[in-house]
Image (tube, helix red, strand yellow):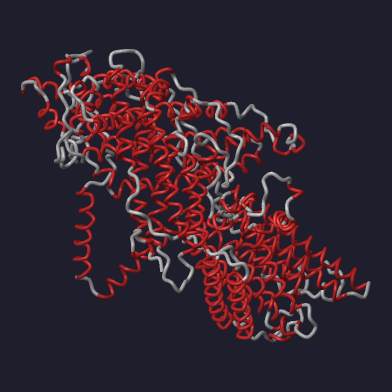
Amino acid sequence: MILPRTGERVKRAFTLRNRSSASEDDFRTPLLRRRSTQRTISHLSTRARVKKYAKDKLIETWNFAKSRTGQGIIKCSIAYVLGSLATFVMPISGLLGKSDGKHVVATITVYFHPARSAGSMIDGTICALIAFAYTAFISYASMAVSVFFAHQHLMQLGHAIVLVVFVGGGLGFIGWFKQMLGSPLVNVACSLASLASITILTKEGAIQAATYSHVKITQTLKMVLMGIFASSLVSFVIQPISARKDLRKDLMTATDLLGDLLTTITATFLSGHEDQINYPSFDSVTAKYKKAFSSLVSNLRESKLEHYVLGTENQHHLEARLVRCIERLATDIGGLRSACLIQTALLEKPSFGATTPAVQNGLSRSNSVSAISPLPAEELANRMNGLESIFEEPEDNSDNDTDEMSVFFNSPREGISPMTQHPSAIPTATSAADIFALFINNLGGPLKSLAYTLKEVLAELPFGSSPDYEFSQNATFRSSLIEANQLFKRARREGLNLLYQNRLLNKTKSEEIAADYEEVAASCGYFSSSLQDLAEDTIAYLDVLEELELYLEQSATRKRSWNWMKFWRLLSFKTVSRTASEEQEPLLPPQTAEQGLSKPISLPTDKENDSKHVNPNRSAKSQPYSYRLWRALRFFRREDIRFAAKVGIGAIAYAVWSFMPFSRPFFSHWRGEWGLLSYMLVCSMTIGAANTTGYQRFTGTCIGAVFAIAAWAAAQENAWILGFFGWLISLCCFYIIVGKGKGPMGRFILLTYNLSCLYAYSLSVKDDDNDDDEGGISPEIWEIVLHRVVAVMIGCIWGIIVTRLVWPISARQKLKDGISVLWLRMGLIWKRDPLTILIDPATPTSSEDFTGFKSNSYMDIRESLRLQRFLTQLEALQASASKEFELRGPFPEIIIQRILAATGRMLDAFHAMNVVIVKDLKASPGEALILKYTEQERMQLSARISHLFTVLASSIKLEYPMSDALPDIEHTRDRLLAKVFEFRKIHRGTDVATDEDYELLYAYALVTGQLATDIVSIIREVELLFGTLDEETLKLE
């Protein structure tokens, strides 16, 4: 093996097991300690117990306060206190004039809280300014229309236009924009725009009186700037957060977790036991990696803004390449895991031609090899000595065991590898376990050595320790890894050649035995190939690190650049920008729930030429008038446009009472503007999302009202006590927002508290705004809270009614359509054999199918990303569908979760196949011969997979039961594997095809095996949903 830190080649025994991983003793130890602790506590007095409990809680609270989450909560509470000074401190309050809406400054610090990175604060500031600009445009334009028609003595017509265009159209556009982008910062910016626009349109009265008023617009700008300034000040001064440093920390975390996954998967493959890969700890590491990569992508986006402001945009491009390298490494790890899972499944198969399983508890090499070997016991023992270093025996926790590479192992004579044994010593395999034993006996040592080298490279931190994370790179890593990879390549070639010298090759007549043999060989070959790909991609990762190191060394003398500000260069570099965006596309953040709910599901029936009235032989102008009108109105059939329209219609119906003279006093008394704001917040694309938001909005309002009443009763209009109560309440709310990640609930509580308590204080200090109906300078807090709660309740109910009755969009229906469309698309991908592109690259790619994707022999990286995002959209719909109530019964959430999980595994298999294909889109001569020889079997297998996808899509769409006589994939796949076995047998001993030429078919075989397994599991789930087709279900009556 190669020591990566020094590049030294050594022969030593070592283990892949992480010393930090918990053993069984580790799990028992805390329990024993807890028992002794409980015994000690039981003898304490009640007073001592209370004292110890309080002390433990104080220590726990202090540790939490020192954590990053705790510091973020404290920062948010400080920003909130600064924002509330605009209400409590007269000099600051005076800057905003005479108005009772100064609590909006504190609300802005809640919306754009400082517990975020500098890049995120920059993004939030931009969103807030855009929201204000939109509000100013809506306000001035509506005032101009009202004044113009008033001068024409057509004030009612002017009010009608304002209602339709600016209330309906303006608020409808806000709803559409929020759902389309779905970013959390965009959501709060849309809430801010709704708040300001609704206040000016319905409350201030300038539009109703047909006059110009700059006071509220100017005040809104001041409040936005003051709130953003308070949040930014706290964010940049108190424990500032840098997305650039967080990105480096996430890079370190991701590589460490990938190293842990690599060692676990490799140890599982070598041992033949699937226990390690099925441990909850392995799933925990996988979940941690997904979380780390999601954070990595988010920090990459935020660090981009920081780099752009600092003039180091080139460094951002290098960091983006690092993240792409991490993404490729994760894909390689996924390939290793697929091969490992195939291995464990194959070990459960019976011996070739037998009916009993070959092994019971994984792969026992000593038993398996001894059973199939014709050698004497002494010679067999000598051969097995070289394999002892591969076994993963439990390690002692003694003090002497301090160096995991301190024990040398006995091996054959120096310079002689296990692969150089005499052919007569090659045993005959009779089971999958025997073939794996042969493979690991000859390639296990080199495979484990390369895995160890990769583990050490990934574990080495490319950056220093916190808080600066300075760059730290070992220069010998690259050369050590290259040498280790070359050693593994040679050992792999010899090992696979030896594997196919097994005497069973000359005896196999059965197609089933040949297929099983080739499937085992495919698993071994694909695992070793994926490990080799991982090594090559790790070398590419080290290359990018070297480029980054060189850039950082030259940063002191390099001039900063702000090329992104040169907007006039965008047109001239349009093609370059498009290429760059395509390179960045796999790194875009995953879809949020809001984005998933807003995306339309394109069905095959949505195509324009599906109309029965269309004559394809006639031009568009000569088609019937009804069809031309139907086609012209296609824009209004889009779900997002209909959603914007119904938001506007509901807003018009609610706001119209503020424009009528007889109803305006009632509207103002009961604070109808807050009901309209609640309506805007509740309206969602689907019924389930509206139910969830409405519940959170109403619950948060009630809790905030209780807090406001308690604080006002205790403070008795004292600003100091109110400020202290506000700080305590903000701590609780920001714990919900930042600590628990439930932003809407925490924001609704604080918003109601501000609307009630801070508003009441503004009245008490004579910030006169004609609010005598709520007590004037002696505010009636109960009446204020009642008005807010009633307005919010009416707004929530109205939002749910509009969502349910006006063009309702059911998440259940969208989910059903989406799953059907996704399976149809996956069937189209396999309709034509994916490997055909390698021998027929001239396939046309200009046509588009109904999903909007371009038709191709297989798919490119961008389409793979789109499929993954579409699945994310379906997961968001699944979460929303579970909140919808229907009389026919509850939503089958568990079954749908399993269906989506299986679909996700199939998409991962699609992506793994795509990665193998795009490595070289032109087949080598050996690959071309193999593909031609197996063309008929591949076409049949692809057609069968495509057919099953279509059947599943039809069943889920129509909600019909499935037939229990569906075609089987495994038999067709066995014929393909037998064909590959036959080709290898015919051309054995020739140079027609090398082992590398078979790697593509090996990957194809494993992917189809994964698809077969997951399709069978989905069929079972669909049968649970709709049953099985029989005579009883299709009675003709």
Q: Position of residue 319 (x, y in %)?
A: 54, 35
Q: Nearer the viewer, residue 597 or 940?
A: 940
Q: Position of residue 752 (x, y in %)?
A: 60, 74
Horizontal side, residue 907 vs residue 366: left or right: right
Q: Nearer the viewer, residue 960 or 20?
A: 960
Q: Nearer the viewer, residue 713 or 304?
A: 304
Q: Position of residue 61 (x, y in %)?
A: 41, 62
- The outermost residue toward the left is 377
Q: Is residue 463 visible?
A: no
- Residue appearing at x 18%, y 23% in the figure: 507
Horizontal side, residue 165 vs residue 682: left or right: right
Horizontal side, residue 820 vs residue 718: left or right: left
- Rendering quarter of residue 436: top left
- Residue appearing at x 37%, y 42% in the figure: 1011
Which quarter of the rendered picture does the N terminus lie within?
Answer: top left
Which quarter of the rendered picture does the C terminus lie within?
Answer: bottom left
Using the image, determine if residue 902 lies above or below residue 805: above
- Rendering quarter of residue 643: bottom right
Q: Position of residue 53 (x, y in %)?
A: 32, 68
- The outermost residue toward the front is 1037
Horizontal side, residue 381 vs residue 217: left or right: left
Q: Nearer the viewer, residue 776 or 983?
A: 983
